[in-house]
Image: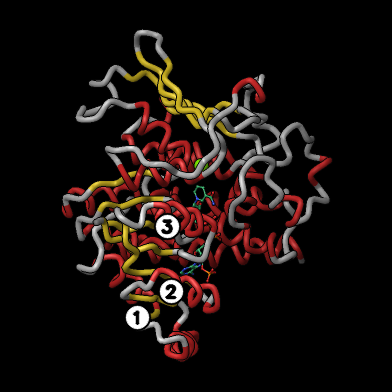
C-alpha cells in the first residue's frame, strides 16, 4: 500500500490525482491533503478520503477547518501555514508526495519531500524553475526519486531508457517538447490587445487552473517547461526544442543519434501522467479513454510564432544567463499573471513586466535557499513597481 500526501488537493491536478487513486483503493491510500483557503472543498475531500493530516496553508482558515471537520466526525490532525505543508511533505505518514500546489508557494514543501527521500510526483514546475539545482541536491541527499507529472516531462521520461548516467550516454540528441500553442495560436499582436482573463483561460485541449492557463496562452508555460526539462534531465538549453502541435496528442519526443524519434501519445488528460508516476515502473488503469487515431485523423506540427509570443525567448534567455535569473523570471511572471487575472494589467504587458524585471535585477549565482527566497521577494517588488508604472 503506497501512502500519499497530496499537496494542492483542491486544484485541477489534485482532482485528477484523487480520481486515479480512487480507482485503486487497494494500492493507494491518502494520508495527507492540503489546500490554500478552500476549506469547503478540503472538508469534502477529507470526508471522502479520511487522511491523517489536513493542511490549510492560510492560518486564518485553520479554526474554521478544525470546527468543520469536528462537526462531521473526521478525525484528521489539522496543520497550517508553510510549516504545516513542510510537515505534511516530510512526515512518516507518507511514502509519496504529490506536489500540486501552484507557484512558488510549493517550493519549500517540494524541497522537504525531496530531502526526506519520498517518491516525489512533481507537478509544481515553478519550484524546479526557481530552485532546480537545490532540488537536485535535495533529491541526491534524500535518496528518493522524482517522477514528473507535467505531461511533456512525463512523456520524455517515458521515452528515455533508465539507468543511464547522462543523455549523451543514452544516445540522445535532442528533447522535443510539444506545445499546443494555447488559445491564441495564429493570432497577431494587434488581436491580443483586448484579451480578457476568461479568454486566456479557455484552453482548446486541457482543463487546468487559471495561472497555468494564462501561462499557456502567453507560451511562458513552455518557457518554464524548457527550464524544467533542463534541470530534470540535465539537458543543455540548445538540446531542448519546442514544436507547436495543436492537437496535444503527442505529449513530447526524444530524438536519438541514430535518427530515431520516440514519442509518447495519448488523449490530453493529466490522469495518464499521474497514473504512470503513481504506479511506476508498473502501469495501471487511469480512466482515460483510448486514443482514437482514426477519429483524430491528422497530427499537425508547426514552428512557434516567437514574434507574437515572446515569453518563450525570455525563458531561454534566463536559462542562458543562469544563476538566479530563472527565479527572477518566475517571480516576475507570477506577479504579472496575477495582475492580469485581477484585471490590472493588459495581456501583452505580461511579457513586458518580465523583460523589464530581468533587465533591472542582477543575476547572482545561487548558493542557498535563503538567497533564493530573498531574490524571489526582490523580483516580486520590482515587478509590482513595473506594473504600477505601466498602468499609471
Ligand atoms: P489549481 O489552481 O487548479 O490548484 C492549485 C492548488 O494549490 C489548490 O489546491 C490551491 O488551494 C493550492 N494553492 C494555491 N495557492 C497556494 C498557496 N499560496 N499555498 C498553498 N497552496 C496553494 O492549479 P493546477 O492544479 O492547475 O496546477 C498545479 C501545479 O501543477 C502548477 O504548478 C501547474 O503549473 C502544474 N501543472 C498543472 C497542469 C494541469 O493540467 N492543471 C499540467 C501540468 C502542470 P485552494 O484551492 O485553496 O486555492
Ligand atoms: Mg505541461
Foreground mark, 3 or 2, reads: 3
Q: Are marks 1 and 2 in contact (CB under 8 Å)?
A: yes
Residue furthest toward the top?
A: 258
Q: Which residue is mark 1?
A: 76
Q: Secondary structure at mark 2?
A: helix
Q: CA distance from mark 1 to mark 2?
A: 8 Å
**Disc 1 crowd, CA 10 A, few/some/many (<14, 14-19, 20+):** many
The outermost residue toward the front is 26
Which residue occupies the foreground of this view, 19 or 130? 19
Give the residue displayed 34% in from the left and 69% down from the top. Answer: 32
Q: Quadrant of the N terminus?
A: bottom left
**Disc 3 to disc 2, how far (Cα)?**
13 Å
Please state the horizontal and vertical placement of residue 69, each as a whole percent of the image.
44, 85
Point 71% across, 41% down: residue? 183
Q: Quadrant of the C terminus?
A: bottom right
Residue 324 visible in rendering: no
First of labels 3, 2 by sequence position: 3
Amino acid at each position: 500500500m503506497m501512502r500519499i500526501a497530496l499537496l494542492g488537493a483542491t486544484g485541477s491536478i489534485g482532482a485528477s490525482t484523487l480520481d486515479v487513486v480512487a480507482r485503486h483503493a487497494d494500492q493507494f491510500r491518502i494520508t495527507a491533503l492540503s489546500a490554500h483557503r478552500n476549506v469547503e472543498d478540503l472538508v469534502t475531500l477529507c470526508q471522502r478520503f479520511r487522511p491523517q493530516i489536513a493542511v490549510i496553508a492560510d492560518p486564518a482558515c485553520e479554526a474554521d477547518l478544525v470546527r468543520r471537520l469536528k462537526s462531521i466526525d473526521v478525525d484528521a490532525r489539522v496543520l497550517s501555514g508553510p510549516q504545516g505543508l513542510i510537515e505534511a511533505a516530510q512526515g512518516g505518514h507518507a511514502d509519496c508526495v504529490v506536489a500540486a500546489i501552484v507557484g512558488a508557494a510549493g517550493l519549500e514543501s517540494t524541497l522537504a519531500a525531496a530531502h526526506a527521500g519520498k517518491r516525489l510526483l512533481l507537478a509544481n514546475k515553478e519550484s524546479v524553475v526557481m530552485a532546480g539545482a537545490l532540488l537536485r541536491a535535495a533529491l541526491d541527499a534524500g535518496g528518493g526519486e522524482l517522477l514528473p507529472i507535467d505531461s511533456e516531462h512525463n512523456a520524455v521520461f517515458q521515452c528515455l531508457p533508465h539507468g543511464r548516467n547522462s543523455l549523451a550516454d543514452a544516445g540522445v540528441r535532442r528533447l522535443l517538447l510539444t506545445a499546443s500553442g494555447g488559445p491564441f495560436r495564429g493570432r497577431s499582436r494587434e488581436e491580443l490587445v483586448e484579451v480578457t482573463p476568461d479568454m486566456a483561460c479557455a484552453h482548446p485541449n486541457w482543463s487546468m487552473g487559471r495561472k497555468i492557463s494564462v501561462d499557456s496562452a502567453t507560451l511562458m508555460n513552455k518557457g518554464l517547461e524548457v527550464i524544467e526539462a533542463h534541470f530534470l534531465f540535465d539537458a543543455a538549453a540548445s538540446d531542448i526544442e519546442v514544436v507547436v502541435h495543436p492537437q496535444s496528442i503527442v505529449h513530447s519526443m526524444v530524438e536519438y543519434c541514430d535518427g530515431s524519434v520516440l514519442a509518447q501519445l495519448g488523449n490530453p488528460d493529466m490522469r495518464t501522467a499521474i497514473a504512470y508516476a503513481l504506479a511506476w515502473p508498473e502501469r495501471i488503469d487511469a480512466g482515460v479513454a483510448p486514443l482514437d487515431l482514426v477519429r483524430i485523423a491528422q497530427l499537425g506540427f508547426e514552428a512557434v510564432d516567437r514574434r507574437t509570443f515572446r515569453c518563450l525567448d525570455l525563458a531561454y534567455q534566463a536559462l542562458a544567463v543562469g544563476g538566479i535569473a530563472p527565479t527572477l523570471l518566475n517571480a516576475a511572471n507570477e506577479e504579472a499573471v496575477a495582475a492580469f487575472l485581477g484585471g490590472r494589467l493588459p495581456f501583452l504587458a505580461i511579457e513586458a513586466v518580465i523583460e523589464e524585471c530581468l533587465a533591472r535585477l542582477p543575476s547572482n549565482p545561487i548558493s542557498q535557499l535563503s538567497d533564493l527566497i530573498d531574490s524571489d521577494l526582490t523580483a516580486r517588488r520590482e515587478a509590482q513597481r513595473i506594473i504600477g508604472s505601466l498602468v499609471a
